[in-house]
Image: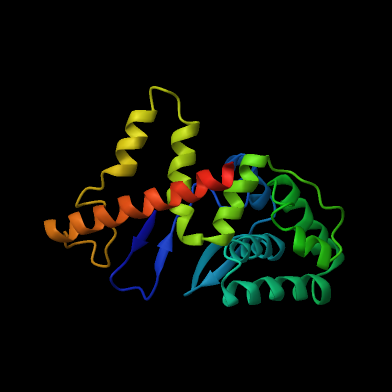
Amino acid sequence: MTYIHEDWPCDIDVHRMFPGFFADAAVAFDALWASHCRLTVAHEPVIAPSKAGAAVVMALHAARDQRSQRHLREQELVEAALIHSFSRTEREEFASIARAGAAVWVLRRIFEAADLGPVVVDVSDEDKRRWELFADRVDDASSVAWWQQIREASWLEKPQWIFRALWVTRQDMPRNEPGELPSFGDLWRYRFHRWGRGVEAMLRYLQRSR
C-alpha cells in the first residue's frame, strides 16, 4: 500500500512482503528484525534494519530492474560497500539475511563479486520466471503479483482476489490527493488502462513460462 501525506515531500510504501525474498514473508522479516537498530529521523527514534539488513533490501530493490541505469549504479554501490567498507561481521550478516530470506539466487551477482560464499539456487523454477519477468519489465511486477496471489489463494478466496484485481473503486484508485475522489471519467480511464496493462503482462508471463 502507498500512503501519501499532503505535508510530506514523499510517499510511504508499506510492504507485507519485499520482492526478492522468496522465503515466507514472516521468515524474511524475522531475519531483518533480528539485527534491527534505531535511527533518529526528524528528532524522532525510528526502527530500521541494520547496516547489513538495509544493504540486502537496497540490493534486492536494485536487482528488480536491470534496464535502469540508476538501479545498476545502486547495485554497484552495494558491491563496493561490501568489498571495501563492510566489516567481516557485517558481510556475514548480509549473507545470512539473504540465505534466510531465500534471496541468494536473486543476489548471485553480488555474492560472486563480493565473495560472500557459494551461490545456491534457493528458488523454484516458477519463482525464477517470475523474478526474471520483474527484472526485464519492472512495470509488469504489479500484474504478476496479482496473478501469483490468485494462484496461491484457496478456491473459496480466489473469486474475491479476482474481483479486487479487476475492479478498482473510486476510493481505492491511486491519486496524489487522497481527500479528493477522482471523476468517473478518470476512474474508467484508469480501469481500462489497468486491464490492458494486465492482459499484456499476463501474455508475456505465459510466454516466458512455456
Of residues 15 and 74, the one nearer the viewer is 74
Q: Report the side of 90 relative to 177 (left or right).
A: right
Q: What residue appears at the point 82 percent right and 52 percent down from the top-left corner?
A: 119
- Residue 169, relative to residue 42: is it above or below? above
Give percent across and percent down for residue 92. Answer: 82, 58
Q: At which x and y percent is residue 60?
A: 63, 60
Which is nearer the eye, 84 or 43?
84
Count the marks: how many?
0
Residue 109 can be seen, yes or no: yes
Q: Residue furthest left?
A: 184
The residue depicted at 45 percent of the width and 47 percent of the height is: 203
Give residue 59's quadrant in the image. Answer: bottom right
* Colour scheme employed for the rendering of this structure: rainbow
Q: Is residue 173 visible?
A: no
- Point out residue 169 in the picture as x, y percentages from the top left corner: 21, 48
Query: Which residue sits at x=49%, y=47%?
Result: 16
**Image: 140 above or below 86:** above
Q: Is residue 103 left or right of residue 129?
A: right
Q: Quadrant of the C terminus?
A: top right
x, y percent for residue 130? 57, 48
Q: Which sits in the foreground, 91 or 128?
A: 128
| Residue 191 shown left or right of residue 74 in the figure | left
Q: Residue furthest top?
A: 156
